[in-house]
Image (spheres, rainbow, N blue to C red):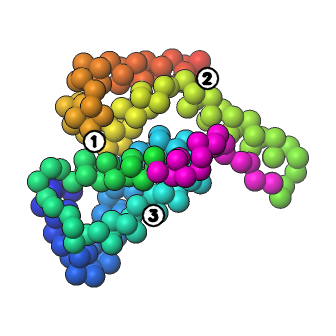
Amino acid sequence: MTDSDFTRYMSAMAKGDRESLRFIYDEYLRLIFAVVYDTIGQREEAEDVTSEFFIKMYSVAASYRPGNGHKRWMVTIAKNMAVDRVRKLGREALVDEIPESPNSRESHEDEIVNRMTVQQALKILKPEEREVLDLKTVGGFTFREISEMTRRPMGTVTWLYGEAIKKSVSYTHLRA
């Protein structure tokens, strides 16, 4: 989506057009969820904040000012909302809970093993590596844009991305 398309949708939302919100939601749901999840680290909370983000975006549509890149604007808001949620929760450790399985004990144990494998995979990347990897792969940002958003030198951003890729590839080969 171009900046001009985004501006047009935001203007329409400011006039009450909910269909425009759907277009933006469809285009950016994955990006916003990735940014929020990287900050919070807990799926249910990240889903809640992501939903709240799009509700907030609809309510502040009239105040949107084009010119600085709409993706950067959205990521900044999403990240701030996620940080606020972490503060609100009192910085308590957020851990995904495994729901009771209505099936047999074996399927419940399989679910635990599968969930642990995902958690282990997430643990191999440092938070800053996960952030850069998500912004690059999910968000489609350039290294320069990521550098500006994260306030890190571009060399550091490219190094973090390279490290994340190396670790991911190594982990994938170890698991195969």
Residue at 27% of width from left, 80% of height from top?
A: 17
Q: Nearer the viewer, residue 75 or 121?
A: 75
State the separation of the CA atoms marked 2 and 3.
36 Å
Q: Earlier in the sequence, mark 1 or mark 3?
A: 3
Judged by depth in the image, the label closer to the viewer, 1 or 3, is: 3
Mark 1 and 3 residues: CB-CB less than 8 Å, in contact? no
Quarter-of-image position of residue 94: top right
Quarter-of-image position of residue 56: bottom left
Q: What span is colored magenta in the figure?
A: 84-101
Q: Residue furthest right?
A: 105
State the separation of the CA atoms marked 1 and 2.
27 Å
Task: Tell me which amino acid carries mark 3.
Answer: Glu
Residue at the disc numbered 3: 52
Task: Tell me which amino acid carries mark 2.
Answer: Arg
Residue at 81% of width from left, 41% of height from top?
A: 109
State the separation of the CA atoms marked 1 and 3.
23 Å
Q: Identify the disc placed on residue 175.
A: 2
Look at the image and say whether residue 95 sits in the magenta stretch. yes
Q: Residue 146: horizontal and vertical position, in percent? A: 26, 34
Q: Residue furthest bottom?
A: 16
Magenta stretch mostly in which secondary structure?
loop
- Residue 32 visible? The answer is no
Q: Nearer the viewer, residue 83 or 154?
A: 83
Question: Dividing the image into 4 quarters, which one contains the C terminus?
Answer: top right
Q: Residue 64: horizontal and vertical position, in percent? A: 20, 64
Q: Residue 5: horizontal and vertical position, in percent? A: 16, 63
Quarter-of-image position of residue 102: bottom right
Dot 1 surroundings within 10 Å: few (below 14), some, or many (20 or more)? some
Dot 3 surroundings within 10 Å: few (below 14), some, or many (20 or more)? some
